[in-house]
Amino acid sequence: MDSAELDLLIGTLRATMIERTGAELDRALLEFGWLELLTESPDIAIPLVFRLLGETGAHASVLNDVVGHAADRELPAQVALPFTGGRWVSWDRATGPAGQGCADGGAGLHAAHSSGDKARSGESARSAGVDTTGDSALDPELPLRSLISGETLPLAEGRRALAWWLIGTSRTMLALARRHALDRIQFGRPLAAHQAVRHRLAETLVAIEGAEATLTTADDDLGALLAKAAAGQAARTAARHCQQVLGGIGFTAEHEFHRHVRRALVLDGLLGSTTDLTREAGAWVRTRATAPRLAQL
């Protein structure tokens, strides 16, 4: 795929995600050929689609497809994904790969603990039983629901995908804060004229660029784990610094910033949070008494 074709693909996908989200976007991506692109060119499909999901604020159940692609087999409609705090969730979808119904209603991330084995943030997940009880929802737009137990699945490819989604979300939060800092005038000067504000934005950009750089070497399980942890940390840094730059407007429902913050918190928790994965990486190094070379400098 040459640069012109890639630019056309990016423009088409961005326009699609701006106009659609959720089940409607699921159907549009299937018609677009998402599954074929994932099969033939995962190195292009995953960064492109997931980063654009973050940048546009749209959502789709494509994480299920990435996990299924890594497992190299057809998965059940309910795929368990470990969530921080010893919980399991599934990402419901209105249409399956064949365009047939796979899930009935139910939105929101239910925070009830599983009644079976507690989730591990390690390199596999189990899926099966569904528990639709619970009424709390951190991001009510996402069709996530609680699960109980199931089979083992690889998570490295899913973690790389979520890292790209988090990076896209972080860049959007930074763009919102930057625009506000340039447009907002206080005491006759734009907010961006103040050094403290510029430092917050610069620190956010450094965190995002650093997280994206880790993805260029995330070729194995440990690399994917560290990339997801770095992207989650960058998203939390972006949420904290950009909220301070936005001030009171960032807390309001009228401003879109809060949607990206909630989305980042949920995505950070999926397949292991920043804290979970950092602890797991430390245990990996401690157990082996060695640290692998992650990049050639």
Image (cartoon, rainbow, N blue to C red):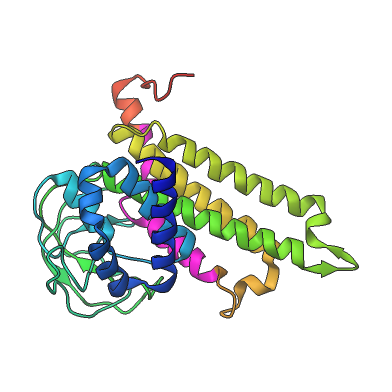
Q: Residue at x 18, y 71 (%)?
A: 95
Front residue of this view, candidates 129 and 204: 204
As rendered, which of 27 and 176 lies closer to the eye? 27
Q: Please give the name of the residue rendered at 42% of the width and 23% of the height, measured from the top-left corner.
A: 295
Expressed as whole percent of the image width and height from the top left, the position of residue 265 reads: 44, 60
Q: Is residue 268 magenta?
A: yes
Asked whether 141 or 178 is in front, the reply is: 178
Q: Quadrant of the N terminus?
A: top left
Q: Residue at x 36, y 54 (%)?
A: 49
The quarter of the displayed image where residue 40 is located: top left
Count how many numbered circles sit on residues in the image: 0
Q: Quadrant of residue 283?
A: top left
Residue 152: x, y in percent?
Answer: 13, 48
Q: Would residue 234 be found to the left or right of residue 17 on screen?
A: right
**Is residue 11 visible in the rendered structure shown here?**
yes
Residue 102, given in percent of the width and then of the height, sits at 14, 71
For the point 90% across and 68% down, which residue is it?
Answer: 187
Q: Is residue 297 above or below residue 66?
A: above
Q: Quadrant of residue 31?
A: bottom left
Seen as rendered, the residue at the extreme right is: 188
Residue 159 in magenta stretch: no
Q: Position of residue 236 (x, y in %)?
A: 52, 54
**Span highlighted in magenta in the image:** 258-282
* Secondary structure, magenta segment, majority class: helix
Lateral position of residue 287 relative to residue 99, left or right: right
| Residue 211 vertical position relative to residue 129 in the rendered view, above or below | above
Asked if one can make out residue 273 in the rendered structure from this viewpoint, the answer is: no
